[in-house]
Amino acid sequence: MNPFDLTDTLETMTILVDTREQDTTKARRRYASFGVPWRREKLDWGDYSAEFTAPNGKVISLNSNVAVERKMSLDELCHCFCQDRGRFEREFNRAKKLYLLIEGASWESIYAGRYRSKMTAKALVASLLAYTARYNCVPQFCEPGTSGRLIKDILYREGKEFLESLPYEGDKEVVP
C-alpha cells in the first residue's frame, strides 16, 4: 500500500467490540476513550479487534488475525486460569495473535498477592508465563482509565503493520 493510501486507510479505523462484552457505563467510557468509531460485533476470539476501509472501498478486517482480550482485574484472570481454564485455553488456541490486557495489575501486585483468589502468586506467574511461551501472548498491564487508549493504540499499530505488509507494485495494489 502506498504511503498516501496507508495514511487514508488508517484514518478509517473502527474498533470492533465483541457482543459478549457487557454494555455498562464504564464500558461506554472506555469506548469513548478509543477516540475512533466503534461497533459491536460477534468476534470469534478476544474482546476487541479493528477494521479499516481502503480508498478503493474494500474493508480490511483484523478480526481473523489479531484481537485484545481484556480482563478487568487479577481476580477475573485467576478465575479464567482456575474455574474457566478450558474455555480460556480454547480461546487462545483459536487465536492467531491475542494481546492479554489486565487492568489494575502489575507483576508487583501479583508477587505481593494483591488479588482475591486461592491461586498462589507462584501459580499465577507460572500460568501467565506459560501462556506467553505457548501462545506468544505477552500480558499488558494498565490502569482501567488507560485501557481504551491502549486498546486503540495496539490495534492501530497492528493495522499499520498489516497494511504495510500488503503487496504493492507501483500503481497496482493488492488489497484483500
Image (tube, rainbow, N blue to C red):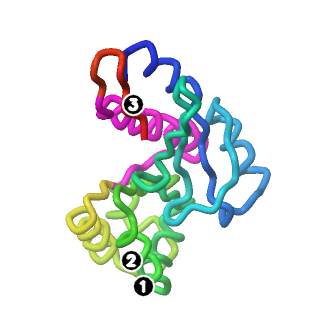
Q: Amino acid at mark 3?
A: Lys
**Which quarter of the figure is the N terminus placed in?**
top left
Q: Amino acid at mark 2?
A: Glu
Marks 2,3: beta carbons within 8 A: no
Q: Secondary structure at mark 1?
A: helix
- Front label number (1 vs 3): 3
Q: Amino acid at mark 1?
A: Gly
Q: Which mark is residue 86?
A: 1
Q: Residue furthest front?
A: 172
How far across and how far down the image is residue 88, in percent?
44, 76
Q: Residue furthest right?
A: 25
Q: CA distance from mark 2 to mark 3?
A: 28 Å
How far across and how far down the image is residue 168, in percent?
30, 25
Above or below for 40 versus 168: below
The local crowd at label 2, few if under 14, some if 14 to 19, many if 20 or more residues have their Cα within 10 Å, is: some
> Magenta part of the protein: which range?
139-167
Q: Quadrant of residue 166?
A: top left
Residue sitting nearer the eye, 173 or 121 = 173
Q: Secondary structure at mark 2?
A: helix
- Front label number (2 vs 3): 3
Q: Which residue is mark 2?
A: 89
Position of 160 with respect to 55 (left or right) is left
Identified at 46% across, 47% down, the residue is 62
Q: Secondary structure at mark 3?
A: helix
Identified at 52% across, 49% down, the residue is 49
N-terminal of the two: label 2 or label 3? Answer: 2
Main SS class of the magenta portion in the image: helix
Identified at 68% across, 62% down, the residue is 19
User: Magenta stretch containing residue 146, yes or no?
Assistant: yes
Q: CA distance from mark 2 to mark 1?
A: 5 Å
Marks 2,1: beta carbons within 8 A: yes
Q: Quadrant of residue 41?
A: bottom right
